[in-house]
Amino acid sequence: MSWLEVLISALDPLVLLYLLGGVAIGMVVGTLPGLTATMTVALLTPLTFWLAPEQGFAMLIGVYKAAIFAGGTTAILINTPGTPASIASTFDGYELTKQGKPGLALGINAIYSFLGNMIGIAILMTIAFPIAEFALQFSSPEYFALAIFGISMMISVSGSSILKGLITGVIGLILATVGLDPMLSIPRFTFDNVHFMEGVSFIPVMIGLFGVGEILNQILTQDKEEKKLKPDLKDLGRVLPTLAEFKRLIPSTIMSGTLSSVIGAIPGAGGDIASIITWDLSKKMSKHPEEFGKGSIEGLASTCTANNGVIGGAFTTMLTLGIPGDAVTAVLIGSLMMYGMRPGPQLFVEEFSFVTSIMIFLVIAAVFTLILGLMGAKLSTLILKIDDEYIWMSVLLLCVVGSYALNSSFYDVLIMAVSGVFGIIFKKMSFPLGPLILGLLLGGLAESNFRRALTVSAGDYAIFYTRWISGILILLTILALITPLIGSLLKRFKSKT
Amino acid sequence: MKLKWLNSDVIAGVLLILVSIFLIVESLEFPDAMGTEPGPAFFPIVLSIILIFLSILLIIKGVKTNVRHFEITKEIRDNIKTLGLTILATILFLFFWRYLPFYIIAFLYLFSLGIIFKIKITKALVFSIFTTGIIYYVFSEMFLINLNL
């Protein structure tokens, strides 16, 4: 199937309708602080199971893209990032609002999110196919090394506690061992319960951790006084930047878009990291660094470009290697697996048209988001007025129904509920959830390939480090784990001396 | 006597060690490996040993830093009550789901949450009916999923 044929099939009105629906949902979700793209994609995944894969995935891509964009809206209007990716948009976006230019800030968010997305998608389209072709050479040792490398990368960016990231990563790997053993089909940790034979269901765990866990945490940490401070913006002012402003923003946009795509491709490094790094670099590149943090349109544009640029990068690693670039793509891997597809180089051979459709959906989602973003600037201020309580009620019921709907299984609901309780405990104790999901996702891949490799090598462990690709990946895994450790030791040493 | 070092990290570390030991004991029951591959017990045992090691580090860190993750401040005391009631309502919902039609139990669940969240009764009533109706329609009518257990 050629690109043109894929394009024509991707332009199916029903697929576009689901994509548009996803964008609309993503816009609402992203605008509401606390509702993340990850949570919504996890919640909608069982719902899309009943659709054709193209329709379902188009909807999820729409949600992902629009939620990341809309996260900037709250960052700009109320100084609260709607999603973690837009944390750096508060630096200059909210300052612009305080200066009476919320319209311009929202306009920059819409336009530069679109541009960042386009740069990311261009990079995805350019490098995904060669990477996938290269990755076709991989066999068991490389897949094992790749799986542990993916987990190690997410752990290494686990924020304040690498140790806690490691623990949740290992818990995820252990959870992945529940069910039938991948080589000999021997039941493990099933406790004679038939429901556990197929392993711990990924989707209910995801819904529990990111949905129920998040809502329970919001209930626990709600600030009733802060809630009363809802914005009342009657006049947004101009929305579009002038031509002179647009020209001024070109260098930082190109830098932010390109760099964030690379950062997005690194497993675990998402929009939050990319936008902070590019904001800092833009400041260094700028002729007006003194404006940064005080309402600089350059600063805002670079962060908006970056947090959307990462999407292309995250999809590159997800599609070509089967390793998620961020938490949302981790969930999207689960969604693809639900459709019976396993992301990785083989997907480019077996499902070429679907892979190219995904790239086309990303472009269309970006266009829809741009249009809705520019048209709906005023509407977004109204969405912000929805009380949290209504959202909590809807999400809690959706979590229950969503986890049940996939297999009509009450066991899945119980797994979701237990995961939800663990979700809030982990959150309170600062255990990152990303490595757990990644461990659960990649555990089977790591174990089966580890054991297969040892069967091939007649039990010789040298197979993992004498083959150059797996050797390099294992070396990178070790580096990813020890570099932050050395860094913190050095910091401690310096503070003592 | 109040043990100053007894914090959530230490408790989590101890619990994780106990779980890991249980997993190792369970794994030892798995059949032996065939041929040259390490067998079904290998991965769980290795992972459990790693988890024990990491848990020991967590305990040491917990004792050293003594960070309190669950400190109950005046601000969140009310929130804890709301959280507890939310969890209770959810447990009751899941328990009674098999005895009542979905649309009734879902409505009761949402309405009770509305009361717990201190939403005005009329608003909670309207919202509960509306949301239950939409969710029931989408899942039962559009996707033909039987939501009654």
Image: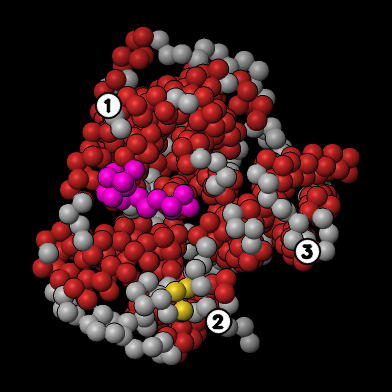
Tell me the residue that label 3 is attached to: B98
- In-image side of A228 versus A59 (left or right): right
Q: What residue type is labelled 1?
A: Ile
In the image, the segment drawn in magenta is A337-351
SS for callout 3: loop
Mark in the foreground, 1 or 3: 3
Label 3: few (<14), some or many (≥20) within 10 Å?
A: some
Tell me the residue that label 1 is attached to: A254
Q: What residue type is labelled 3?
A: Arg
**In which quarter of the view is residue A40 placed?**
top right
In the image, A494 versus A243, the foreground residue is A243
How far, Cα to Cα, is label 3 from label 2? 24 Å
Question: Residue A84 location in percent, x, y?
Answer: 48, 44
Question: Residue A209 location in percent, x, y?
Answer: 55, 58
Q: Residue furthest right?
A: B122
Residue at (39% x, 41% y) in the render: A271
Q: Are marks 1 and 2 on the same chain?
A: yes
